[in-house]
Amino acid sequence: MSNSYGAIDQTLIDHFEDPYHRGDCEAATHVAEGENSLCGDTMQVQLRISPSDGQIEEAWFDGDGCVVSQAAASLLMETIEAMTSDAIRDFDTPAMLELLGPSIAVSQQKCGLLAWRVLQLALQSPLDEFGDGPTFGGPHLGEEN
């Protein structure tokens, strides 16, 4: 398939032009960000995860970069909503590449995997009850006497 984006699959083009859940998640419980050091693409993933069952209630992203990285993020956010965090941990690199489809060249795989890498970090990066940064089990500075 040839279009103004080269040989990129139409599904990815649709997600790039009309992204799913691009912006901020108002009630995020988990957040992470990362970048592709080779090309400068950036990505932030924000999740609202149910504390009772670990289900992804909302998944949002924001970032800058190429068609592949931004479309992959949109497609991934749409795919993971309603999944559990355990299921997402099992969603591995081959599964993400399969989701992206066969039109992704080997040279584009790092771009296509950026959102997946940041998602995996977000699962491990809960915000504290004040909405500030990841929690690490210690007291919040506001709690110290």
Image (cartoon, helix red, strand yellow):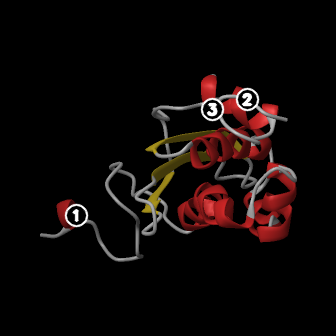
Q: Which residue is mark 3?
A: 16
| Position of residue 82 measured from the top left corner of the image (x, y, whole percent) | 79, 42
Q: In the image, is residue 53 above or below residue 139? A: above
Are circles 2 and 3 on residues that touch, CB within 8 Å? no
Q: Which residue is mark 1?
A: 143
Q: In the image, is residue 67 above or below residue 120? A: above
| Position of residue 75 measured from the top left corner of the image (x, y, whole percent) | 72, 40
Disc nearest the viewer among 1 and 3: 3
Local packing at callout 1 (Cα closer than 10 Å; few below 14, some 14-19, many 20+) is few
Q: Nearer the viewer, residue 128 or 16?
A: 16
Classify the position of the N terminus by image quarter: top right
Disc nearest the viewer among 2 and 1: 2
Q: Which residue is mark 2?
A: 3
- What residue is at 45 percent from the left and 54 percent from the top? 41
Left or right relative to 128: residue 100:
right
Local packing at callout 3 (Cα closer than 10 Å; few below 14, some 14-19, many 20+) is many
Q: Give the residue type at disc 1.
A: Glu
Disc nearest the viewer among 2 and 3: 2
Q: Earlier in the sequence, mark 1 or mark 3?
A: 3
- What residue is at 81 percent from the left and 64 percent from the top? 91
Q: Give the residue type at disc 3.
A: Phe
Left or right relative to 143: residue 83:
right
Left or right relative to 128: residue 108:
right
**Mark 2 and mark 3: span between their CA atoms?**
14 Å
Q: Give the residue type at disc 2.
A: Asn
The secondary structure type at the circle numbered 3 is helix
Classify the position of the C terminus by image quarter: bottom left
